[in-house]
Amino acid sequence: MSFLSKIFGDVNQKIIKQIEQTVVQINQLEPTFESFSDEQLLQKSNELRAELTNGKKLDDILPEVFAMTREASKRTLKQRHYDVQLIGGIVIHRGQIAEMKTGEGKTLTSTCPVVLNALTGKGVHLITVNDYLAKRDAAWMGQIYHKLGLSVACIEHDAAFMYDPGYTNQNIENDGSEVFKIKQEFLRPVSRQEAYLADITYGTNNEFGFDYLRDNMIYDPKQKSQRNLNFAIIDEVDSILIDEARTPLIISSPDQESTDKYKQFSKIAKGLIENEDYNVDEKMKAVALTEEGIAKVEKILGIDNIYTEGGVMTVHHLEQALKAEVLFKLDINYVVKDGEVMIIDEFTGRMMPGRRYSEGLHQAIEAKENVEIQRESRTLATISLQNYFRMYHKLAGMTGTAESSAEEFSKVYNLDVTVIPTNKELKRKFLPDKIFKTEVGKFRAVVRDVKQLHEAGRPVLIGTISIEKNELLGQMFAQEGIDVELLNAKNHLKEAEIISQAGRLGAVTVATNMAGRGVDIILGGNPVVKAEQEKVVELGGLHVIGTERHEARRIDDQLRGRTGRQGDPGSAQFYVSLEDDLMRVFGSDKIKSMMTTLNFPEDMPIENGMVTKALDSAQSKVEGYHFDSRKHLLDYDDVMNKHRQAIYQKREKILFANEALENGEANENQVPNRERILQMVESEIEEVVMFHTSNENEKKWNLDEIFQVAGTIFPLTEQNKLELKNILAEAGDQTQDVLVRTKIIEQLNKLAHEKYDEMVKQISNDELMIQIEKSILLRSIDTLWIDHLEAMEYLRTGIGLRGYAQRDPLVEYKKEAFGMFNELNNGIRNQVVYSIYKVVLGKMMAENLSSTQPTQNLQFQAPAKTMERGQNSIEREASSNQTKADNIAVKPHNELGEKIGRNDLCPCGSGKKYKKCCGK
């Protein structure tokens, strides 16, 4: 006990005592609920749900809900919540972490706060470490929830299930366990949307995170699966929020065509002629294709209309290639060094390694300079687990080992840790570490000691730090004739089965340290053989051996916690060698010198309490280092997270704009997409006019430059230009230049609205126009967001070099990121403004779109196909049909999938040639 605890008392004990008062109230209600029939129990659940709807708080009904849940558990699982489990449930409901020792029943503990929060109808997510546990717990605990009228589902990598006692599935293999029997009978396959609409949804952290990212890539509101992130309870919270915190989730798509596209358009750009095929605005560093230039490119590509047949991405590639060719000069804007294009800082003249131009411009320059084009695999969306889980309205967790990481939980997630007392007094013994000179000697000693225990019949669980050591020990045991069960977490189903049998008489199990989390080791095996159980208890219970100290104390504690569950006897001991990584980091020269001087044999240990304390201290220092590292990464990721939230919010407003209007939910923050586009057009017009009229003397203003830029947005007639010139001619007084600018802007805005109205009339299909507007907005955001992710990653990679200039890299990163985010928003506006009038211009476009069922082509789908764990990320590949979304419209095909030629019969059945009918 610390000095402060002696003076002020143990804070944890005060919390427990305060919660115990609520537990007394719950226990007092037990006889009442025992007297209820099943129908009355269900009715009570519905009444409590109604009370919440009518304004009652969750804490007001907590005692009743906990008592009701305990009664449902007694009737379905034949398990009664212990008082300490109720305490743990209250801690979880409060949005804290409950540290409960292994075997204390965390799975059952979670049911009380789950039911309480699920009654709100807002959804509760329970996060597990693997698919097996998600399905097991949904089926197992689903019996309780179903009894109380709550729906429960689970999601896994490529499927989703709903707990349904009326459903029988005979196609799932049964491993013989009782839980799998339940799973086989009652888990009904459902859609992901239905699974998320359930009151309670089980699944892994990766699945929830990837579904969040996919929901922010859809093009149809009906494809959205998740609801608002309300309440999440994380099982093994230290594993998910700390061990995996540095592993971002990434959805990526192989950009197979990008290299060829950049090279192809680089060649085309080289053949275009200034003032004939394109015009350059050097003031704004912009370049725009003329009608002649567009016609030339269409002829080269062999297509009739680059906007309708090529799609947004084709135009984007062309524009970037032209910019790279015309506006960016070698040895001025960039240099080529070691086969890489490096940007030159225009202010300092220094190279900026690690920085890249965004929006595909850097790749276009690489194609121009004929160097390797990088980033063939494009990141479509990414998020860290830290930032994903911080989005939940309420977050809680449970684990057997959280206290040693309490500081990180508090600082990063604002989560307090409360240690829950055990139901029965712990009888396990933690023996001092055995220290060996060499790793080989250590393993020999492990085999020798285990052989003695095995012959006596005592079960032993050996934890290894890697699969390699796991298999090495297995071979050494085999040479001694000892049958062992090897477990290295390659098979979740086998993992549960092996771990559950590790307590049998004479069992020897070799497992990686993290294996078996969530599965209890029962003495005598599962199902329990009573005679074996009594014999094992007499021998001292399960003995756990750790073959190496981990960098985090939590992992060692987790291994130790496999023994001595629910008051059972047991013991644990670590075998450490001077060649172990942690011992080398700690610096064991003094011990090594002593062992060498005394001529210790390799397999003879020393047991020294001071060495064990020194190891604990070393672990604490390493944990501190890793915490600082994770906190450092999070500081950078927080910047990106703000960008992500802003873009995703903007995207959601666009996606649901039409639905909001139809439902009467529109407000100043939810405007129609058409109005949003016209606002962008007006902003662009204002910026163009302001830029080209910056000179105080309006007589020196060059309206031709304004005409040229405005003409690339929408077509200007000679009459339009004359009206604008008349505004300037009528100005007279030079002091009224602000008014003149305003009149020019207003006139151009008026023309923009008129041209847009004409375009809508030509389309003559409101539903189709709504789809086009939504698609243009979303595709522009998605295209440039992907480039922004790349640019930010390159910035992050090279920003550390600023430290050499005595500048804080994080401050520099925030400054540059702010500028890049503004560029992103401007880029989105530009892409929408300079595309919308062209993409839907003319009646041919309208008919072409109508004949090809555009609502299908406008959808963006990115279902997950594979999931691979990389060194620094988890990547999920998006479907290749993403490229379909790049085409706002495509040329129609016949039944064989062949494109319809201009002289072929029209597929509409009119009997006319395509060019005389729908292709007119």
Image (cartoon, rainbow, N blue to C red):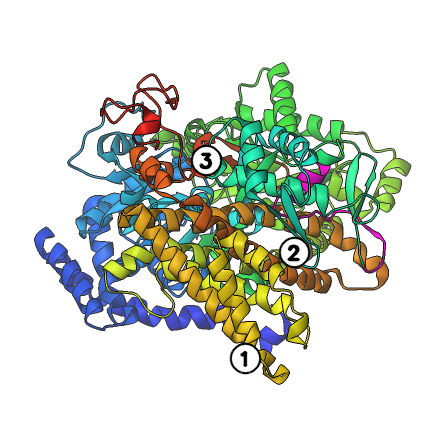
Which sits in the foreground, 534 or 484?
484
> Would residue 362 be counted in the magenta stretch?
yes
Tag 2 secondary structure: helix
Q: Calculate the distance from the C-alpha at mark 1 to the C-alpha at mark 2.
A: 59 Å
Locate residue 64 relative to residue 702 in the image: left or right. left
As shown in the figure, which amino acid type bears the numbered disc 2? Phe
Residue 593 point in image, percent of width and height: 89, 41
Quarter placement of the N terminus: bottom right
Q: For residue 706, what is the image quadrant?
A: bottom right
Which sits in the foreground, 97 or 71?
97
Residue 917 point in image, percent of width and height: 29, 30
Q: Calculate the distance from the C-alpha at mark 3 to the C-alpha at mark 2.
A: 38 Å
The residue wearing badge 1 is 739
The 10 Å Cα crowd at callout 1, few under 14, some 14 to 19, many 20 or more, is few
> Would residue 878 be counted in the magenta stretch?
no
Locate residue 477 relative to residue 101 in the image: left or right. right
- At a point 73% along the width and 62% down the height, the residue shown is 812
As shown in the figure, which amino acid type bears the numbered disc 3? Gln
Which sits in the foreground, 363 or 20?
363
Residue 226 point in image, percent of width and height: 35, 49
Q: Nearer the viewer, mark 1 or mark 2?
A: 1
The 10 Å Cα crowd at callout 3, few under 14, some 14 to 19, many 20 or more, is some
Tag 1 secondary structure: helix
* Residue 367 appearing in the image: yes
Q: Is residue 244 above or below residue 665?
A: above
As shown in the figure, which amino acid type bears the numbered disc 1? Leu
Tell me, for residue 627, which label it has, or none: 2
Tag 3 secondary structure: helix
The residue wearing badge 3 is 882
User: Which residues lie in the magenta part?
Assistant: 347-366
- At a point 45% along the width and 35% down the height, the residue shown is 882
